[in-house]
Image (cartoon, rainbow, N blue to C red):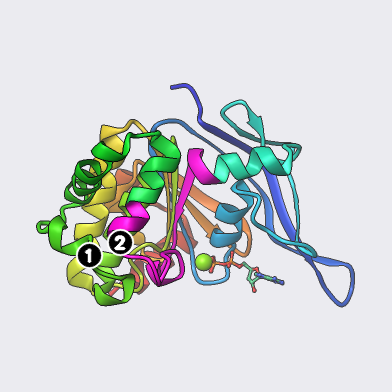
């Protein structure tokens, strides 16, 4: 499988009273059109790993790597302009709370339509039908009604599904989902992940699913990295997770409700 993303010796550090403290300490992985899960307790460096791939760590944070290659783009040496293009179109990120990512003063329909005009260069006449189609793809049953609503008028699960529809407009090849369902009721978590899963497969994309929830990640990923204090301490196929003999992973599994 041709890699979409290659990560070698990725390190993220911040200034500390004495020198710098590393919060990601030299991690390695490579990803094709497959689903990689990153799990670990809060503060283990999962989000910093995800954000560094998009070069979203701001000064005084520092990111270094022997290799951080996304398709033909060398992330650490790319120009700001090139990175804006990568972030806007080729790698999409879904975060915990859609409220921070959707524009509160524009209707859902207009936001999607704007994205379609900008990224797909669709003629205006086709935008309306395509907007409804995008919403149907994330299993919104009554898109004609939803397009007229503002983000605050929909539930968290619906908001997250709208967010996923938005993220897919530019046809990215990699989706980074950082705790995408942590703010949602358990009853809608699986629904949102099922949609992500279906779209990833259909569009032949790579997925990095970041979550503190081991069971969730093992259900939706092919491979899993277990992080602790900035390091990958265990790595396995998702189906082997329950049988991991690593003591830290065993401890996390034992702590699951
Ligand atoms: P996770 O997503 O696994 O919960 P993070 O990647 O967000 O963890 O954070 C990893 C570590 O980096 C944490 O200990 C956090 O306190 C630290 N950290 C995050 N942002 C900053 C910052 N701006 N300055 C200093 N330390 C930070
Ligand atoms: Mg996090």
Where, quadrant-wise, is the C terminus in this rendering?
bottom left
Q: Residue 106 colored magenta? A: yes
Helix, strand, or loop for circle 1? loop
238 in relation to 257, above or below:
above
Q: Quadrant of residue 19?
A: bottom right
* Image coords of residue 221 (percent x, y): 34, 46
Q: Please indicate, yes or no, whether residue 138 appears anywhere in the rendered image.
A: yes
Q: Nearer the viewer, residue 248 or 92?
A: 92
Image quarter of residue 25:
bottom right
What span is colored magenta in the figure?
Answer: 88-112
Q: Which residue is mark 2?
A: 108
In the displayed structure image, the side of residue 155 where residue 232 appears, left or right: right
- State how many labels appear: 2
Contact, CB < 8 Å: mark 2 with mark 1? yes
Frontmost residue, 22 versus 47: 47
Q: Which residue is mark 1?
A: 148
Q: Residue at x 71, y 44 (%)?
A: 80
Give residue 44's mark: none
């Amino acid at each position: 499988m041709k890699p979409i993303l290659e990560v070698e010796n990725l390190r993220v550090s911040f200034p500390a009273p004495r020198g710098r403290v590393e919060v990601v300490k030299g991690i390695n992985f490579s990803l094709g059109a497959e689903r990689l899960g990153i799990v670990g307790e809060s503060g283990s460096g999962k989000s910093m790993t995800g954000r560094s791939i998009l070069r979203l760590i701001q000064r005084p944070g520092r990111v270094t790597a022997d290799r951080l290659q996304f398709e033909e783009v060398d992330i650490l040496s790319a120009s700001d302009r090139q990175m804006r293009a990568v972030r806007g179109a080729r790698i999409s990120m879904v975060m915990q709370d859609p409220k921070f990512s959707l524009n509160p003063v524009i209707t859902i329909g207009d936001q999607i339509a704007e994205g379609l005009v900008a990224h797909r260069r669709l003629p205006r006449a086709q935008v309306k039908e395509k907007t409804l189609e995008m919403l149907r793809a994330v299993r919104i049953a009554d898109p004609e009604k939803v397009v007229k609503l503002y983000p605050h008028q929909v539930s968290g699960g619906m908001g997250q599904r709208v967010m996923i529809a938005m993220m897919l407009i530019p046809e990215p090849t990699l989706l980074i989902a950082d705790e995408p369902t942590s703010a949602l009721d358990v009853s809608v978590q699986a629904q949102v992940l099922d949609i992500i899963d279906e779209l990833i497969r259909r569009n032949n994309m790579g997925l990095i699913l970041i979550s503190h929830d081991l069971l969730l990640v093992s259900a939706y990923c092919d491979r899993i990295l277990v992080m602790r204090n900035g390091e990958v301490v265990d790595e396995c196929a998702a189906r082997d997770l329950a049988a991991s003999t690593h003591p830290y992973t065993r401890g996390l599994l034992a702590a699951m409700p």
